[in-house]
Image (spheres, helix red, strand yellow):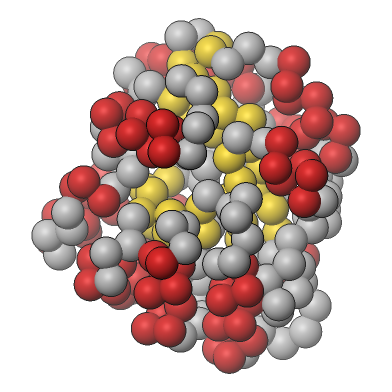
Amino acid sequence: MHTHSIASTHAYATITEMAQEAHDLGLFAIAITDHARTMPGAPGPFYFESLAILPAYIKGVRVLHGIEANICDYNGNLDVEPQLQDNLEWVVASLHTLTIEGEATVEKCTQAYLGLAKNPNVNVIGHSGSEYFKYDYERVIPQLAKEGKLIEINDSAFRYKKSCASNCTQIAKLCKKYKARICVNTDSHYTHTLGRGTETLKMLEDIDFPQERIVNANEETLKAYFKEKNIYY
């Protein structure tokens, strides 16, 4: 539920190719969440507005019209206009080094996530296990849980960013403690990583994380979330 297409310009598959791979893997749904405007090479707002012309199902897979918005300041504001956020089906919000100015301290990042928690349009907090953007997990995760945000456990941390893996495990343990819901995502920039979450799922099994709080654990749990958020399926 966090993927990129060629529209992000540093991803390398079309939406149709991603949907075909999802179909071949037996996935019920994916979210296309190309990068918002302040990421170098990202498409402009008109691209996201025009996603509405796409059919809801491509290759038999529910393809959500989404965006990966950039947290652009340490108050938790995003680089996406509120109206566009509201019109999209799926909003992932993430911190990236290329899209925010100023030194990233633990306190600043904590305030950014606390501010973001109040945004009703955000579904998912993206790859928050970053070592560079470390925050006070004990302060933030209960608030994210209270506001109903999904906390992403990004499998790329276990595949490519081993230094972040321990942070992700700590976050998952606190999500379990504070009854936060999570989303296991691949952050796929090409078809070959879509649906691959083996290492993340093993970690969640090791800590005995409740499957019912993994929103995309299966089709039933995902449909339940869609129903809760009035997302067509």
Can the viewer see residue 11? no
Q: Is residue 23 above or below residue 145?
A: above
Look at 55% across and 67% down and name the residue there: 117
Coordinates of residue 147 in the picture (x, y in percent): 47, 63
Q: How many labels sit on residues?
A: 0
Q: Is residue 138 above or below residue 47?
A: below
Coordinates of residue 193 in the picture (x, y in percent): 44, 37
Image-based side of 133 in relation to 10, left or right = left
> Which of the 4 image quadrants contains residue 150?
bottom left
Coordinates of residue 212 in the picture (x, y in percent): 21, 46
Look at 44% across and 44% down and name the residue there: 186
Image-based side of 185 in relation to 115, left or right = left
Look at 37% across and 48% down and name the residue there: 184
Look at 59% across and 66% down and name the residue there: 118
Can the viewer see residue 178? yes
Coordinates of residue 138 in the picture (x, y in percent): 37, 83
Of residues 230 and 51, the one drawn nearer to the viewer in this rendering:
230
> Which residue in the rendered view is the most extreme toward the top?
59
